[in-house]
Each structure stands twice: as structure tokens, then as C-alpha cells.
């Protein structure tokens, strides 16, 4: 199970400011179960964004769609066959879903609508590649879908370091340098100037801080009668 909560509406609105045709894309599994990013939440987010833009007097088109899973190519490929034209996709999936969408649809701008917080996973059967640490403060909007916290061996927010060579990490040359990938991604989308901005030190208090965490949503918690 992957758990997250929606980013504040003001933060979402700010990252979507340059775009006029937006698809709010829900995910039908983990984030649906935790009531953060399913079909219902996608509709609520789209409605809130539309109302905000109307109050600001801005002409935007915001619509919704939901995939069963944004972390599997099979469902992304089905979506891509009939994908509506849009300037950006606001993904309400976890950080893994955002990055999988970015990898499969490299010509689209995929932005995170959730802050992924923590993940539980089966211990057997498959093999998974870790793409998201669940840091609780998603920065995938800055790097357009490639996580520097997880995929950089040093979790650098301002990269690359001086040790990468030929696009590979100095820690392990079988690993792609995350900041090389980020540079290529930003260059492809004409946004490489984003690397000029110096990011402040990471606030790790939203991540694995103080031991195992429990997330409680009082607005959806069952009444116990106590």
C-alpha cells in the first residue's frame, strides 16, 4: 500500500499556472483506497481548480480521467491511445506513478498532485525498482518526473555532483546519474533553466522521522463510539 495526501490547492495552482488545458488524472488503486487520488478526488480537485481560476478571471479547461494503475505500462498505453489533448497532466498517483507516467509518455508534462508519504509492499514474488522514498514533500514538479531524492545516490537537490562520469553515478557505475537524466529531461521540454535555481536543504521531518509513522485522516475515520 502506498499512502499520500493531496498537495495544498494553492501549491497545485502555482505549478499549473503556465498551462491552460489540464487533465487531472486519478489512479484507481492505492491512492483510491486511502481516499487521496481516485476518481472522486480527481473530480473534486478539478472542480476546485476550475473555481479558483474562474475567480482569478483566467480561461482554462480542466477535465478528469482515472487509470486503474499509473504505475504499469499496460494501463498507460491504453490511456495514451485515446488521451485527450492537454498542456499538462496533474497526476494524483504516488511518486512511483508520476515517474512511470513520465517514462512512458516522455513528450507529456506530468506533475505531482500528491505528497507521497510512505509505502508498504509484498516481500516476495516480484522484483521492484525503487523510484520514490515517500519523503512527504514531492519535488517532481521541479525535475519533471525524475526523483533526485531517490534516484541520486546522494539525494542531492542541487546537482549533479562532481563525481558522475558519462551519465553514470560515481557510487555505482551501473546506475544512471539522476541529475544527468534530469538535465536531459529538462532540456527536452525546454526548461533547463530550472537547474539555475538553488533549492534549500531538504526538510526531512516530513519523511521517516522519529520512527515508524501512522497516518490518520480524521475526515474519513470511522466513529468508534468512544
Image (cartoon, grey):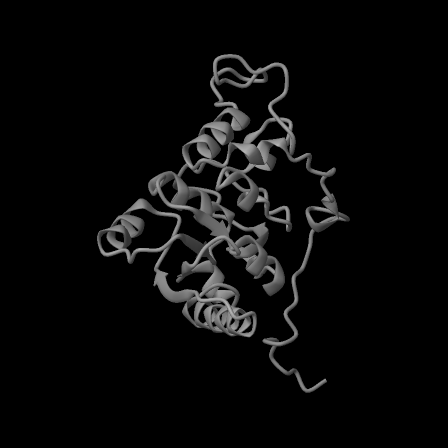
| Residue 124 percent coordinates (x, y) | 44, 42
Residue, far left = 81
Residue, far front = 57
Residue, far bottom = 225
Residue at image position (43%, 37%) is 189
* In front of the other: 59 or 14: 59
Judged left or right of residue 102, residue 223 is: right
| Residue 223 percent coordinates (x, y) | 63, 83
Residue, far right = 210
Residue at image position (36%, 63%) is 66
Dividing the image into 4 quarters, which one contains the C terminus? bottom right
* In front of the other: 198 or 1: 198
Judged left or right of residue 136, residue 83 is: left
| Residue 174 percent coordinates (x, y) | 47, 18
Residue at image position (65%, 82%) is 224
* In front of the other: 32 or 126: 32
Amino acid at each position: 500500500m502506498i499512502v499520500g495526501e493531496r498537495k495544498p490547492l494553492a501549491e497545485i495552482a502555482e505549478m499549473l499556472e503556465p498551462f491552460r488545458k489540464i487533465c487531472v488524472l486519478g489512479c484507481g488503486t492505492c491512492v483510491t483506497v486511502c481516499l487521496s487520488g481516485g476518481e472522486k478526488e480527481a473530480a473534486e480537485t478539478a472542480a476546485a481548480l476550475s473555481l479558483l481560476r474562474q475567480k482569478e478571471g483566467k480561461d482554462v479547461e480542466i477535465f478528469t480521467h482515472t487509470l486503474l494503475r499509473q504505475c504499469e505500462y499496460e494501463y498507460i498505453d491504453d490511456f495514451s491511445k485515446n488521451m485527450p489533448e492537454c498542456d499538462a497532466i496533474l497526476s494524483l498517483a504516488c511518486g512511483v506513478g508520476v515517474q512511470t507516467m513520465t517514462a512512458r509518455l516522455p513528450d507529456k508534462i506530468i506533475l505531482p498532485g500528491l505528497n507521497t508519504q510512505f509505502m508498504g509492499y509484498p516481500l516476495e514474488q516480484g522484483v521492484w525498482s525503487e523510484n520514490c522514498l515517500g519523503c512527504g514533500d514531492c519535488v517532481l514538479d521541479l525535475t519533471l518526473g525524475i526523483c533526485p531524492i531517490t534516484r541520486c545516490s546522494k539525494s542531492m537537490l542541487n546537482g549533479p555532483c562532481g563525481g558522475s562520469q558519462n551519465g553514470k553515478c560515481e557510487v555505482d557505475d551501473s546506475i544512471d546519474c539522476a541529475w544527468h537524466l534530469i538535465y536531459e529531461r529538462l532540456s527536452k521540454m525546454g526548461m533547463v533553466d530550472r537547474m539555475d535555481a538553488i533549492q534549500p536543504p531538504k526538510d526531512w521531518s516530513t519523511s521517516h522521522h522519529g520512527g515508524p509513522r501512522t497516518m490518520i485522516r480524521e475526515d474519513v475515520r470511522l466513529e468508534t463510539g468512544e
